[in-house]
Amino acid sequence: MLVRPVSVTDLPALLALVREAGPGFTTLPANEEQLFHRVRWAQRTFAEQVERADADYLFVLEDDDQQVVGISALTGAVGMREPWYNYRVGVTVSSAPDLGIQRQIPTLFLNNEMTGQSELCSLFLRLDHRWGNNGRLLSLGRLLFVAEFTHLFGDKLIAELRGSADEHGCSPFWDSLGRHFFKKDFSQADHLAGSGSKSFIAELMPRQPLYTCLLTEQAQAVIGKAHPNTAPALKILEAEGFAHKGYIDIFDGGPIIEAPMTNIRTVRDSEPLILAIGTPDNRAQVWLIHNRRMENCRITAAPAWQDGNSLIVDRQTAKRLQLQPGDSIRAIPLVNRQLKAVAA
């Protein structure tokens, strides 16, 4: 398996992936013309022909038969071209000393404080390939790319996780809040947001702080809660240092997790090494490896072991990376060894 930049020839496979993902995958609509535009824009991004505010790094996961089985993406900066709204969950304290009453009420504040930060987005892996290290490679490959090209990204990485919605596309958070101000159901609003109309929808929302106690109990219960299907992705990013700091999506109430660039394990701990060819033995563990290229980026996960400033891999891994012995790579163990030791 390898992660690489998307190409125009991937369009049929991308369309099939998006259709399998279903209507909740709004950042990649099942529209061939829109997908083609995004693929061409991603190619310009990898060629360093766009500004950071417009950068869209779109990756695919490909097997050794050159079959595309997954997709993931990075944006250079959110909110630079149009406001990128979310809610920050805070607390309003009210008191009446004469009556001996004090209340601390959770409150939603509409804001665009994430402006300028870089976002992890558009992650989807085919159901029949959700095994082994495939999901981890697809997700963390982006972070190794960031580690190599940190100057292209913000001080913080964020990820907006899918919130609670049922199989019919109904969201208790949206039905209790957003629907009152924007007369469309959740799936319609979510589609418009994914098509670039998020600021227009948000500006119909009240600017004043909103008391969560005025929402239904069902809506209150899902604030900051990720959809069960996103649990594996959340666990991978939490192990990298991401955490929920109180920001949520304005549509489904899902959590927005974040991490300062300097705190992200793969960014902080990955290192440049020299590629060497050998036969992995009992010293080998699975490493995440990047060929340190931009437009011809190749990232894979494979058994390897470190010997000084060299990383020893087999010939198939070197072939996937399109490298020769002696070439420079950036690498890190795929799994956080400290967490693994604690778990043991």
Image: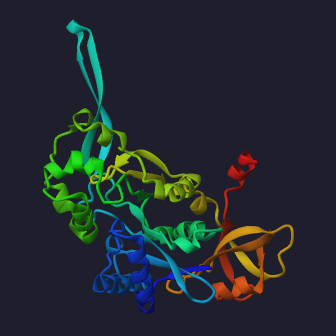
Left or right for 157, reference 293? left
Residue 262 x %, y %: 53, 55
Left or right for 66, reference 43? right
Residue 199 x %, y %: 20, 61
The image quarter containing residue 331 is bottom right
Quadrant where the image shows the N terminus? bottom right
Name the one closer to the observer, 227 or 207: 227
The image quarter containing residue 43 is bottom left
- Residue at x-position 34% and y-position 82%: 35
Residue 100 x %, y %: 26, 9
**From what the image shows, is residue 201 above or below residue 111?**
below
**From what the image shows, is residue 215 above or below residue 197?**
above
Name the one closer to the observer, 176 or 151: 176
The image quarter containing residue 73 is bottom left
Toward the front, the furthest residue is 168
Q: Is residue 81 at least partly visible in the picture?
A: no
Toward the right, the furthest residue is 282
Left or right for 181, reference 42? left
Toward the bottom, the furthest residue is 9
Left or right for 264, reference 317? left
Q: Is residue 295 at least partly visible in the picture?
A: yes
- Residue at x-position 24% and y-position 58%: 186
How many marks do you count on the picture?
0
**From what the image shows, is residue 158 above or below residue 2?**
above
- Residue at x-position 84% and y-position 80%: 279
Residue 189 x %, y %: 22, 61
